[in-house]
Amino acid sequence: MARHKVEISGVNTANLKVLTNEEMVDLFKKYKEGDKFAKEDLVNGNLKLVLSILKKYNNRCENMDDLFQVGCIGLIKAIDNFDLSFDVKFSTYAVPMVLGEVKRYLRDNTSIRIARSVKDIAFHALQIKEELTKVLDREPSIGEIAKKLELTEFEVSNALDSMKDTLSISEPIYNDGGDTIYLQDQIEDKNNNMRYIDDKVALKEAINDLKDKEKYIIIERYITGKTQMELADEIGISQAQISRIEKTALNNIKNRIS
């Protein structure tokens, strides 16, 4: 069977060995007995786990080599602290530790610098959130966390938001097999929006400057939706006259807003 080659940080995952549960247990026993080679085998046998975690950060980090090294630090910490008596799979124990190292690295090395005081508020807010969740048996609101910390809701919310991962505007957010939708496609262009508002104001002023009959015909034609014939019957003039008045009014509006 062909082995699929997937490369992250220059490492070909097809060449990485994946340890069985029995091999993992045997290596941990040897490592705890002082076998240094067992630790090396444990690291090499779990690199695929690190690489699988890093896949989702492929578009968020310019230097995946550095991120891979950081992930390996988390893996080594997991190996050093893992105990077979935990009665859980090593991967279950290791994933949060690897993720923790990766997120900490990205947070500390982001181009957006976050003040230490804000980081401290976020850290304490997360602690309080965990404590209140256990007491209330539900996730607490920002207001409840803020009250416990004696801070405003804005301070707590701002601190927690500052710790979230930043995204590239070129980040793909949806693909149903057709055209991919990117984050930048969902961001409102405020400059275009302001131009739209300016045009709307100018159009309203231009219509208000028309003669009464011109204004009435334009509003009835383009807002109410009446035909020229209906307006001709209503006002008591010919359709040709309605057409001329409408054309003159439109030219006046165009000259006014151009």
Image: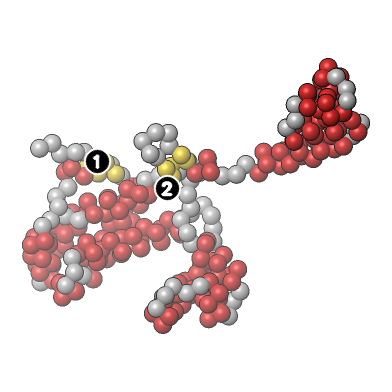
Residue 253 seen in this snapshot: no
Screen quadrant of the C terminus: top right
Q: Is 168 placed left or right of 25 in the picture? A: right
The quarter of the picture where residue 257 lies is top right
Identity of the residue drawn at 42% across and 47% down: 60
Identity of the residue drawn at 35% across and 49% down: 56
Identity of the residue drawn at 53% across and 55% down: 112
- State the residue in front, 55 or 218: 218
Q: At which x and y percent is residue 160?
A: 51, 65
The quarter of the picture where residue 175 lies is top left
Q: Is 82 placed left or right of 123 in the picture? A: left
Q: At which x and y percent is residue 8?
A: 29, 44
Q: At which x and y percent is residue 82?
A: 21, 70
Whichever of callouts 2 and 1 sits on the residue coming sooner in the sequence is 1
The quarter of the picture where residue 242 lies is top right
Q: Is 177 placed left or right of 162 in the picture? A: left
Q: Residues within 10 Å of mark 2 (few under 14, many from 20)?
A: some
Report the amino acid beneath label 1: Val
Identity of the residue drawn at 53% across and 71% down: 142
Determine which of the numbered discs, if any, sits on residue 152 in the image: none
Screen quadrant of the N terminus: top left
Name the residue carrying label 1.
6
Determine which of the numbered discs, if any, sits on residue 60 in the image: 2
- State the residue in front, 69 or 154: 154
**Color style of the picture:** secondary structure
Residue 60 seen in this snapshot: yes
Give the Cα distance between marks 2 and 1.
18 Å
Are dots 2 and 1 in contact, CB under 8 Å? no
Report the amino acid beneath label 2: Arg
- State the residue in front, 182 or 243: 243
